[in-house]
Image (cartoon, rainbow, N blue to C red):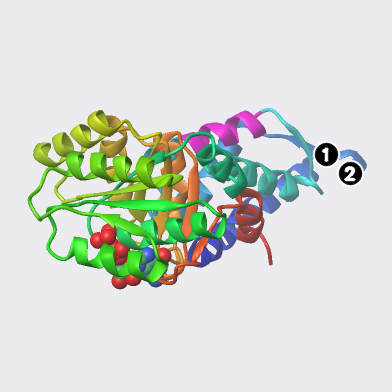
Amino acid sequence: MFDFLKKKLKESIDVIQSTFSAKEKEEEAGKQNKGILSHKITEKDVDEVYGGIKQALLENNVALSVLDAIHSDLKKDLLGKDVSMLGYKKDIENAIKSALSSVLMGYPEEKFLQEVRQRKPYKIMFIGVNGVGKTTTIAKIANLFLKNNLKVVVAASDTFRAASIEQLEIHCKNLGVDLIKHKYGADPAAVAFDAVKHAVNTGADVVLIDTAGRSDLNKDLLDELKKVKRVNKPDMTIFVGDALTGNDLVKQAEIFNKEIGIDYSIVSKADVDKKGGAVLSLAYVTKRPILFLGTGQGYDDLVSLNVDKTVDFLFSS
Ligand code: GDP
């Protein structure tokens, strides 16, 4: 992930550096004392730096609101700063790193597990458009909980999409987890309600609620999800988005966040996405952290987003 963004950022930074090198030569030529060369960064310089990386970010599906945030962060960091003509490259690179770090937001697995251990049964509702990897992600989260000695119940509350219940059934069988299901067309809120009841009766620690996710995100679907939430009062709502869908993922997240509310996000298919723009945009747009990245089709293919490591990777040689 982020390989393409890394390549594009490197190209942009090379261009920014050659622009600044030309400035350096100009200023050097105009100065008497060549030993104290320094430069106060102007608004034009900041715009040049931003202009340099903007294209790279756009080509990697970074959302426009995120670009604006990065621009203003760069301004805050760099404008009026006295930089030595020898050290400015590092200053600029650090400012870009810090602007990217401030839009990204990860969340440690340990804190997530701590949160889930606070109540029993802890109810987690998953939302996201069909095909993004929601079912697989629920199975991965169930696997994580099982490995941490938490007993899991899954609610098959996507009663709309053909085969969704069977698909969950296969995962639950593989993992040895109870699945509560009704027939297709049944009330999703009632399925989740029964799953919570089952969890109370069997002493389960966590209930994972799958939900429907038609791609047009119409009013009926949103009303259905609101009802699941109203009736079952989940302790946490997790949005699952597909990294490969780029800007679509950001649009979906904005709608879900406004209508249903998102506590955390998980971005699936990070292993096949080379751009990373969706990940860069998502936390900023929802103002909520990214809990995990999905990195494959196996149950263990789930990793936390480490912001420092990610940004270091973008600027490593
Ligand atoms: P749903 O319709 O949202 O429930 O999506 P599914 O869970 O059925 O996933 C759709 C497809 O994406 C399946 O083939 C999954 O195996 C695949 N998938 C899910 N998560 C990942 C991931 O992190 N990486 C990769 N490479 N494939 C994934």
Residue 60 visible in the current orientation: no
Q: Which residue position is annotated with label 2?
A: 34
Residue 93 visible in the current orientation: yes
Which image quarter is the C terminus in?
A: bottom right
Q: Which residue position is annotated with label 1?
A: 31
From the viewer's perspective, is residue 28 above or below residue 61? above
Residue 182, percent from left and from top = 15, 52
Three-letter amino acid code at the position of disc 2: Lys
- Write the residue at 42% across / 52% down: 152
- Write the residue at 69% across / 45% down: 94
From the viewer's perspective, is residue 157 above or below residue 47? below
Ligand 1, what quadrant? bottom left
Magenta residue check for 117: no
Residue 271, percent from left and from top = 46, 68
Three-letter amino acid code at the position of disc 1: Lys
Image-quadrant location for residue 287? top left
**Neighbourhood count class around disc 2 (C-alpha, 10 Å): few under 14, some 14–19, many 20 upward:** few
The one nearer the camera, 254 or 33, is 254
The one nearer the camera, 248 or 10, is 248
The numbered dot on residue 300 is: none
Classify mark 2: helix, strand or loop.
helix
Magenta highlight: main SS = helix
Magenta residue check for 71: yes
Q: Is residue 55 left or right of residue 239?
A: right
The one nearer the camera, 310 or 262, is 262
The one nearer the camera, 310 or 121, is 121
Question: How far apart are the alpha carbons under marks 1 and 2?
Answer: 6 Å
**Neighbourhood count class around disc 1 (C-alpha, 10 Å): few under 14, some 14–19, many 20 upward:** few
Provide the residue span drawn in magenta. Answer: 69-79
Image-quadrant location for residue 41? top right
Residue 160, percent from left and from top = 12, 53
Q: How many marks?
A: 2
